[in-house]
Image: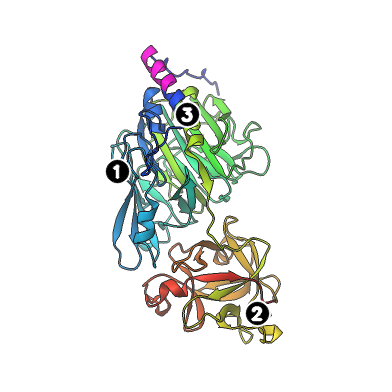
Amino acid sequence: MSVTPARRPRRATPFALLALVLAMATALLGGRASAEGDAVTAGSLPCDLYAAGGTPCVAAHSTTRALYSAYNSRLYQVKRASDGATRDIGALGAGGYADAAAQDSFCAGTSCLITVVYDQSGRGNHLTQAPPGGFQGPAAGGYDNLAEASAAPVTVGGHKAYGVFIAPGTGYRNNNTNGIATGDQPEGMYAILDGSHYNGGCCFDYGNAETNSRDNGNGTMETIYFGNSKSWGYGTGNGPWVMADLENGLFSGANRGYNANDPSVSHRFLTAVVKGGPNHWAIRAGNAQSGGLSTYYDGPRPNASGYNPMKKEGAIILGIGGDNSNGSAGTFYEGVMTSGYPSDATENAVQANINAAGYAASPPAGAPAVGSRVSLRATTSCCTSDYLRHNTADTNAAIGAVSSSSPSADKAAATWIVRAGLGDASCVSFESADKPGQYLRHYDFRLRVDTIDSGALSRLDATFCPQPSHNGQGVSLRSANYPGDFVRHYEYGAYVASHGGSHAWDSATAWADDTSWVVTSPWA
């Protein structure tokens, strides 16, 4: 088919260019704000920079910081498992970081889920629990799961914060938006992601999607995609790649399938950019901690039918595909969508501010290291000499007393080899030290040791994500595919349990203690 030349973005006015130059200078100086009184300069944050470039934000989402220098309101909402209460988590002053201490205090001794990621643009484009669509979610009514609120700890500018940890089955959406591009209208978007947390499931997306949660045909969505799926498109190496999900195709360039200019990326904190207008779109990306953005594609729409002109519908999704396909994994920290096609200069200024924001990893203290041999000691007052182990009479896991005088078989049964998570490499799996090839997994909520096949479900059942403990001792181990459930001992058996759920092992009594484990030297 013939392809018309790419349309150039509109020329900025002299006033807009002057404003952008001043804003870029501010961004490069790294103006920030905090409760401690760090300086913040008007116009220094991402949505200020987009506005200065003539392409204002129409959606701005972050659980880590304000995205406007004047923003001093709520960033996200959490819901507490113990009593169902909710709390909005705001910024520490205008243009500030998230008040993570408020979340820690509110969620102490229990678990919390992120129920809303608020839109800072003033347009009300908030993200909430994704409803069922072409695919059903695992939560009640076919909705997707919500993210566990403490699953992705980071620091930003030295301040503690939390990202949105998307496990398979988790997703957020808004099908009734205000000001988001539709049809062939131009738009831009960026997202800060964890470049080490991904999978090949469809589809870890952020951006513009269908308003009925279904596949409405080629060109009905335009989002950032991150992962290593090769089903529709891919770049060089083994992935993961930043691509664009345009519906019925993950595109890495002009062609379906392989495009050589889209490289595998490995930054711990990744800036991913997609933008599109009439017969013109681009992919850009870079290290969110330092350096600029690279352009992986900039040219006409894909040379496949249905993508020129585009038929964007204007919903917003996070962590899922346009039809609610929800097999993906990833972590989101911040992102925006704009009105109009941003210039490279504007995006470069935004990237300079992102570098200055100071994202850094913050793994839970005491988390087990991949490759190590460990034992896991209970912290409940009744059981501080008990360790997580497998039974000898059956395959079930339990807790039992182990000491230096214990038989060698008991010591071996309470020893685990820490592996990269079988279902999510950003988490861990526990291989039995004395039953090589068998792993701790949950089945009907009961923990046991078992041989794990290649199926996605069993691999996720054997994957646990360490996070700060519920009682301040050691770590808590969250189920990778049940985001509100944690490894717990109950009446000496071992389960994955929610706080106050419908099963006996979900009992609220001693839940925080029973779900906290000290990682110790191995008994064998």
Identify the residue position indicated by label 2 in the image: 413
Tag 1 secondary structure: loop
| Three-letter amino acid code at the position of disc 3 | Leu
Q: Position of residue 385 (x, y in %)?
A: 56, 81
**Residue 73, numbered circle:** 1
Can you tell which of label 1 and label 2 is closer to the viewer? 1
Disc 2 crowd, CA 10 A, few/some/many (<14, 14-19, 20+): many
The span from disc 3 to disc 2 (Cα, nearest Å) is 56 Å
Can you tell which of label 3 and label 2 is closer to the viewer? 3
Residue 193 seen in render: yes
The span from disc 1 to disc 2 (Cα, nearest Å) is 51 Å
Disc 1 crowd, CA 10 A, few/some/many (<14, 14-19, 20+): some
Please state which of residues 415 and 258 is positioned toward the viewer in this rendering.
415
Quarter holding the N terminus is: top right
Range shown magenta? 14-22
The span from disc 3 to disc 1 (Cα, nearest Å) is 25 Å
Q: Is residue 290 above or below residue 319?
A: above
Identify the residue position indicated by label 3 in the image: 29
Q: Residue furthest front?
A: 36
| Three-letter amino acid code at the position of disc 1 | Ser
Please state which of residues 266 and 401 is positioned toward the viewer in this rendering.
401
Please state which of residues 18 and 492 is positioned toward the viewer in this rendering.
18
Q: Position of residue 28 (x, y in %)?
A: 49, 28
Q: Give whichever of discs 3 and 2 has the lower sequence position.
A: 3
Tag 2 secondary structure: helix
